Amino acid sequence: MTTFRQHRWQSFLQGYEQRARILISCPDRPGIVAAVTSFLYEQGANIVESSQYSTDPEGGTFFLRLEFDCPNIAERKEEIEAAFAPIAAEFQMRWQLRLHNDIRRIAILVSKAEHCLLELLWQWQAGELIADIALVISNHPDLRETVESFGIPYVHIPVTKETKADAEAEQIRLLREYQIDTIVLARYMQILSPAFVAEFPGRIINIHHSFLPAFIGARPYERAYERGVKLIGATSHYVTDDLDEGPIIEQDVARVDHRHHPDDLKRIGRLIEKTVLARALRWHLEDRVIIHGNKTIVFY
Ligand SMILES: Nc1nc2c(c(=O)[nH]1)N[C@@H](CN(C=O)c1ccc(C(=O)N[C@@H](CCC(=O)O)C(=O)O)cc1)CN2
């Protein structure tokens, strides 16, 4: 099992032993912020970052993210969660409290394209991506040497139309065995079954190589070229049963013109894809993303 690369994240972890964040969504009404901030104050906490949004103050949904320092939070987490539960119940909150130093275990699924995978591995190697990349699974053998050079397990599980169900069962078994929290599809070119998606609700992040909702599905760059677009882009979204239509986390674009052929679009697009995926994963790992219906609130 991969161990955490504490030495690379020392600057991230050191001095943040008392840091935590709480993410809340609930029906909007007066008093929510007062109730939560008073509770944290009574626990001895000091709020260092606060973000909130309401879809509609009159009966909409309220979203709140508070990051705070609290003495002995690691030892007191369960006690504090239990003490907060009655407040959460009163306001019908959906909420999660997470320690800053709670490093998430992620798995990356890839096919043959390496640019998004490499960006995540480089950022992880540099201590900029604060996650434990515990496992890479691919339906092709091509990237084994690259991944294993980072000291990360690589599992090749071929996928065909005939073997897809068995292949997914093995993928899920491995993801459970490695206690994976978040799955990243780094240009993984297989459509996940509803059964797979249901195993990891809100925890599968994809990078689609177009500025959605344009060019959903396969071969977006070729289709963009045929359409004569002047912008191409990439979109990172949570994976749902509806192909490339899950809640969007992050997007970006670049200008193109008549001189660019499909290979040029792919070259320009690769830089956008890897940047957008890395940003989306960072927001997710920092608990800055709340899914609301088929959209997201992202507290940058
Ligand atoms: N359930 C979901 N699965 C996946 C999603 C999603 O949104 N929901 N996103 C895709 C990624 N993707 C585009 O970004 C994509 C991947 C694959 C295909 C496709 O047509 N695949 C074929 C097989 C292709 C091959 O064998 O090379 C297929 O699965 O039949 C379209 C879009 C990842 N999965």
Image (cartoon, rainbow, N blue to C red):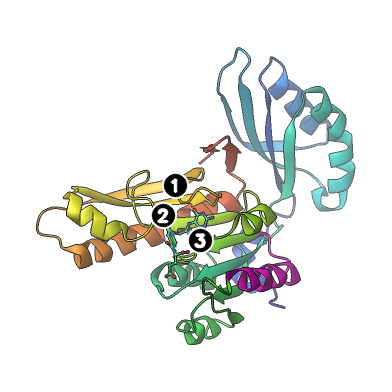
Q: CA distance from mark 3 to mark 1?
A: 20 Å
Amino acid, disc 1 = Glu
Of the two numbered discs 3 and 2 in the rendering, the one whose residue sits closer to the viewer: 3
Question: Where is mark 1, residue-wise?
Answer: 250
The residue at the far front in this view is 162
| Residue in the image at 32% along x and 61% along y | 219
Amino acid, disc 3 = Ile
Question: Where is mark 2, residue-wise?
Answer: 276
Q: Are marks 3 and 2 in contact (CB under 8 Å)?
A: no
Residues 22 and 205: in front is 205
Q: CA distance from mark 3 to mark 2?
A: 20 Å
| Residue in the image at 56% along x and 18% along y | 56
| Residue in the image at 44% along x and 68% along y | 119
Under circle 1, the secondary element is: strand
Q: Find the magenta span and give its range.
A: 164-181
Question: Where is mark 3, residue-wise?
Answer: 191
Question: Could you say which disc has been placed on residue 57 in the image?
Answer: none
**Up-down relation of residue 279 to residue 167 (above or below):** above
